[in-house]
Each structure stands twice: as C-alpha cells, then as structure tokens.
Image (cartoon, rainbow, N blue to C red):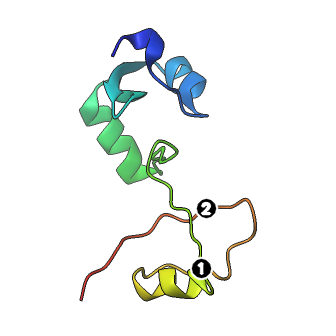
Amino acid sequence: MSDKALKTTPLHQAHLEAGARMVPFAGYSMPVQYSDGVLKEHLWTRAHAGLFDVSHMGQARLRGVSPLSAFEDVTPGDFIGLAPGKQRYSLLLNN
C-alpha cells in the first residue's frame, strides 16, 4: 500500500507537528517515533502523561434485542452508560 493510499487518524497532523516519524500500520499512517527519541518519550510519559491514538482500532456494530447487554457480557467496559457519539477502549474476554 502506498503512503498516499494510507488512511489518517484525527490526530495525524498533531503527530506530524510533534515531529513524528510516520509508518504504515494496519492501513493507517501511524507515528512510530518522535524526533527526540524513544528514551525521551518514555521519560516524558513517566513524568507527565502520554496519549495513545486509538482511532485506528477496530469498531463493532451491535444488533439484536439487547446488543449492549450482550456486549457487556464479554467485555469489562461499561457501554450501556456511554453517551451517544462516544467510544470506550476495552478488551474482549473469554470464559
């Protein structure tokens, strides 16, 4: 896939402005490293805070009689209480 065909996330321009080196990942142009290097990024995150751009990750479409209840049976996330238009990062569980 060429760089021109890659999708971008809503934070793409912010990554570029922060000096990110972008690489193809799962069809998206994603930051892999910033100009100050991995060690400085790690130390900054430990001392302050970090942001992980999850907007390239999968989505689910729920259908049926009670799809949110069924979804909450297999995830630890509270999706029933989630406001419309919002998202929650969670995990899929097994037995």
> Which residue is pictured at 48% across the width and 43% down the height?
53
Residue at 39 percent across and 47 percent down: it is 45
Mark 2: few/some/many CA within 10 Å (<14, 14-19, 20+): few
Identify the residue at horizontal 45%, vertical 48% (top origin). 50
Q: Residues within 10 Å of mark 1 (few under 14, many from 20)?
A: few
Quick check: 32 left or right of 29? left
Q: Are marks 2 and 1 in contact (CB under 8 Å)?
A: no
- Going by the image, does 28 lie left or right of 32? right
Q: Residue 67 or 54: which is nearer the viewer?
A: 67
Check disc 2 and report the residue beneath it: 87
**Quadrant of the rendered image containing residue 43:** top left
**Looking at this view, is 47 or 84 the one in front?**
84
What kind of element bears circle 2? loop
- Name above or below for residue 37 compared with residue 43: above
Disc 1 residue type (three-letter): Gly
* Quarter assignment of residue 93: bottom left
Quarter occupied by the C terminus: bottom left
Q: Is residue 87 above or below residue 93?
A: above
**Picture layout, residue 53 above or below residue 13:** below
Identify residue for label 1: 64
Total numbered badges shown on the rendered structure: 2
With respect to residue 32, does 72 lie above or below?
below
Mark 2 against mark 1, which lies toward the viewer? 1
Q: Earlier in the sequence, mark 2 or mark 1?
A: 1
Location of residue 52 in the rendering, given as x and y in whole percent from the top left corner = 45, 47
Q: Please name the amino acid that badge 2 sits on.
A: Gln
**Label of residue 19 in the image:** none
Q: Quadrant of the N terminus?
A: top left
